[in-house]
Every structure is written in structure tokens, then in C-alpha cells.
Amino acid sequence: MVFVSSFLPKMGVRGLLALALVCGASVALAHGDVTPQPVDTHTLPKLGDKWLEDNPYSSGPQHDEALRIGASGYNQNCARCHGLEAISGGIAPDLRKLDDECVGYADDAKKKACFKEMNDYFISTVRHGRTRDGRVYMPPFEGMLSQEALWSIKTYLESRRGAE
């Protein structure tokens, strides 16, 4: 405190403004509270303990309900880093483009294999997280969000595919 009180009078207006900008930028760039928030999936049938390989909500009778739940779950748990409506601000990957390349395949077998690979990548990443050089780039959500919640979020992301 002695350092600050003796230094501030010598800074002048420009110095104080620069200090305020630096301090404000560090707050603006922070992710805030990234504690996983619960996602209520009680209106969806239980999928069981064994993780499915394909999104059970991509189509079928539960699609609309999973989409509603997934939009909420995404906003509560993913938007801080991946952006509102899955539009990234550059901090983390733009999840609207997660399986973009799969859509372009004309061969159905290749398209199906590509979507399976992207589902595997998505589930592995959200369950186990991602680290580089000991730094956490994405926290693991296994044990915090259910399989129903994660597939619902994937359903939401599929609905945002290609959105501008």
C-alpha cells in the first residue's frame, strides 16, 4: 500500500488511465465462474451408464426436448468460453464448425464415418477435458453432467451448424 500511495501522485492522468485500462482488461478477459452448472434432463429417457457412440437425439421423438435442454445447458456451461449461440469470440473453438467437413461428403459411408469420428471427439473432449503442457484448456465434465445432458448439448450444437 505504501508503494501505491507514493507512486500514484507521480503517475498523472495518463498513467492512471493506463493503469485503469490494464486492470479493466484483466477483468474483461477472465472467464468468471466456470463451475459446471447442473442440467435438468428429467424429461428425457435415461440412456444408461454405458456411453453411446452416436447422438440419440439427432432425430426422433426426443429431438425437440433435447434441443431445448441442450440450448440451456450450453448457455450455462459452454458459452463462457465458446461464445453465445456457439459463436466463438476467438478464445475457444467455434463449435458451429465442429463437424462441418462431414456435411460436405457425398458418399454416405464416408459421411457416417466422419460424424461418428466427430461424436467420439466431442464426447471424449467434454468427458475428459483437454490439457496442454499441464494447463487446462477445457475442464472435464464427466461426473458433473450426465450423458443425457452432453448429448442434448451436442444436439443444440448440431442445430447451430453453419449458422452465421
Image (cartoon, rainbow, N blue to C red):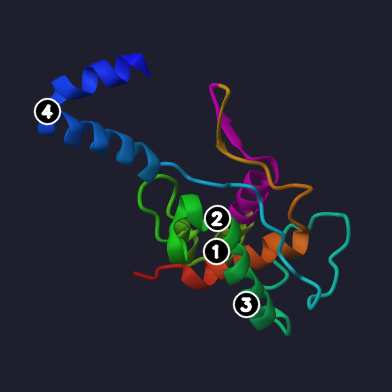
Residue 147 percent location from the top left of the image: 76, 59
Q: Quadrant of the N terminus?
A: top left
Query: In this figure, which residue is indicated by the disc labeled 2?
Result: 78
Query: In this figure, which residue is indicated by the disc labeled 4?
Result: 12
Q: Which mark is nearer the camera, 1 or 3?
A: 1
Mark number for residue 20?
none
Q: Is residue 119 left or right of residue 91?
A: right
Query: Residue placed at 67% from the left, 79% from the top?
Result: 63
Q: Residue furthest bottom?
A: 61
Q: Which mark is nearer the camera, 4 or 3?
A: 4
**Among numbered discs 3 and 2, the one appearing first in the sequence:** 3
* Mark 2 residue element: loop
Residue 59 percent location from the top left of the image: 66, 78
In three-dimensional space, the C-alpha distance between marks 1 and 3, rounded to whole angstroms, equals 11 Å
**Among numbered discs 4 and 1, the one appearing first in the sequence:** 4
Q: Is residue 134 magenta?
A: no
Query: In this figure, which residue is indicated by the disc labeled 1?
Result: 75
Q: Amino acid at mark 3?
A: Arg
Q: Amino acid at mark 2?
A: Cys
Q: Which residues are magenta?
A: 117-133
Query: In this figure, which residue is indicated by the disc labeled 3?
Result: 68
Q: Amino acid at mark 4?
A: Gly
Do labels 2 and 1 touch, CB within 8 Å?
Answer: yes
Q: Quadrant of the C terminus?
A: bottom left
* Mark 4 residue element: helix
**Among numbered discs 4 and 2, the one appearing first in the sequence:** 4
**Quadrant hosting residue 85:** bottom left
Q: Amino acid at mark 1?
A: Asn
Q: Which mark is nearer the camera, 4 or 2?
A: 4
